[in-house]
Image: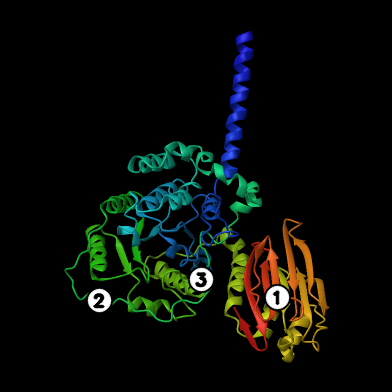
Amino acid sequence: MKHIKIAIKCAVFLSILIVSLYFINKILESKYIIKNSRWPTTSSYNQFYRMEKDSIDVLFLGSSVVVNSFIPQEIYNDYGIRSYNLGSEQQSLFISYYWLKEALRYQKPKVVVLDVLFMWDLHPESSVNMSEGLIRKSLDPMRWSSVKQEAVRSLCKLDNSNSEMSYYFTNLRYHSRWSDLKEYDFKPSMVVDNPLFGYAPIVGDGPDSYTAFFKPDDTKAIMEFQPFMQEYLDKIVQLCKENDIRLIMIDMPGNGMHDGVNNAHVLYSKENDVDYLNLCTQEYYDKIGGDLPKVNIIGHSNVLGAVRMSRFMGNLLHDFYGLQPVHDEQYENSRRYYEHMLKNSSLFNIDDPAEYFNTINDDDYAVFMAAKGDSSLTLNDKNVKDALRQLGLTLSYENDPSSSYMAVIIGGKVITEEVSSEQISYIGSIRDYNSIYSIISGNKKSGNLSSILIEGEEYSIDSVGLNVVVFDLVTQTVVDKAVFSGASIIR
């Protein structure tokens, strides 16, 4: 009997220890979500596991240029084709292979679109052509299975600097994060949600010009693949053939194209009966509809460029590969979120102040305003004044250019609006006190400054005029910041 009691106590102790370690590991792991990262891989991969079984027809794999270029929701909206973007920052063929293998445990895609940028030795310091931090960013969210076990084991055999145990017990790698833990480290719901199916939007203009690749001058030039990358490209090709999947190799615009790269990919595609699209060419640039700098498809596509890129790919998948439209509630339910994302991204491209203020008149936004010096010039335009009044503001500083001024509008409700001849400040919260903000406005005689702090981070541009910061209550992120001075918008 005594031995049984000891065995039970040991079993209970071990159970508590294992559960504790599991939760400690989850808390300490670095998390990349919409709130803190341009490439929110943690949320994107977690969202993948929430998709209904066998509900994805197309998978996108590859580096960040893929993550920023292909929008599954746009492809579904236009063509009814269900896709998911499993790309990640600097994703080498090693990671692409294991994420494809993992995806096939849950899905039966008809087409895989693979970015082949990393066929070259872009990270000679790494045996898998990828930095250790980005490997973990891609592998940590993968569920434990024979696939992840194989990936970790292969990685650690190739690179002695990686510890296999640190992938099982991630607290060994992330123990120093104790002092940097955030709200989302303790709230799994904040980490899972990414209704864009792996796509990550980027806002901003692209380069002013682009030199496209034309047909090769030297048809005999062949660049040698990085041997290890070829090994894993071969594995991807074999995996696709075994599962009756059509593989499309792609080079994205801006991938550093030249004759040797093009010829090597063309030759490989012919020898292995897979398709190859060199989107670096002028022909494809025109077909996609790039229009620099506003509609950027070079390198990391902005949202406008990604919409064009996705429509092009959707058309190709429908017309050439014969994928037919399917009604799917998963994609129907995310339409509104997608439209909201498009609205967020549109703020950057608005040049008219009145249009801007009309656009941010939305219950999904928190709007923070703080004047620096003279901000009254913006009110010279009647349309601007009307738009600001539609926001619920009284604009009592209209005839007093020397005043300090601030306003806060949250969810369509004016929380505060204040005018003074002295410096003024205000502290408040959003999201049930989870996010604290503070505002300072100073005229020329009282500091001549503007400060808009949200969760301890300064977002005010602090230029003369009316400084405005827009916080999205849906994504819990700042989506735009600008200064209004007269008829101009400064960013």
Q: Position of residue 315 (x, y in %)?
A: 43, 71
Q: Position of residue 452 (x, y in %)?
A: 70, 69
Counting other residues with Cα less than 10 Å from the Cα at mark 3, is it few (<14), some (14-19), or many (20 or more)? Answer: few
Q: Tell me the residue at 59%/39% (across/down).
A: 24
Local secondary structure at mark 1: loop
Which disc number belongs to residue 215?
A: 2
Q: Nearer the viewer, mark 3 or mark 1?
A: 1
Along the horizontal axis of the image, is 75 left or right of 194? left
Local secondary structure at mark 3: helix
Asked if disc 1 and disc 2 are in contact, CB closer than 8 Å, the reply is no
Q: Which residue is mark 3?
A: 78
Q: Tell me the residue at 65%/48% (across/down).
A: 187
The quadrant holding residue 297 is bottom left
Q: Position of residue 65 (x, y in %)?
A: 43, 65
Which amino acid, mark 3? Asp
Using the image as rendered, state which of residue 347 and residue 246 is in the foreground: 347
Location of the C terminus (image quadrant): bottom right
Counting other residues with Cα less than 10 Å from the Cα at mark 1, is it few (<14), some (14-19), or many (20 or more)? Answer: many
Q: Does the image show residue 272?
A: yes
Q: Nearer the viewer, mark 2 or mark 3?
A: 2
Using the image as rendered, state which of residue 374 and residue 271 is in the foreground: 374
Q: Earlier in the sequence, mark 2 or mark 3?
A: 3
Q: Which residue is mark 1?
A: 449
Q: Earlier in the sequence, mark 1 or mark 2?
A: 2
Asked if disc 3 and disc 1 are in contact, CB closer than 8 Å, the reply is no
Using the image as rendered, state which of residue 43 and residue 376 is in the foreground: 376
Q: Earlier in the sequence, mark 3 or mark 1?
A: 3
Along the horizontal axis of the image, is 45 left or right of 430? left
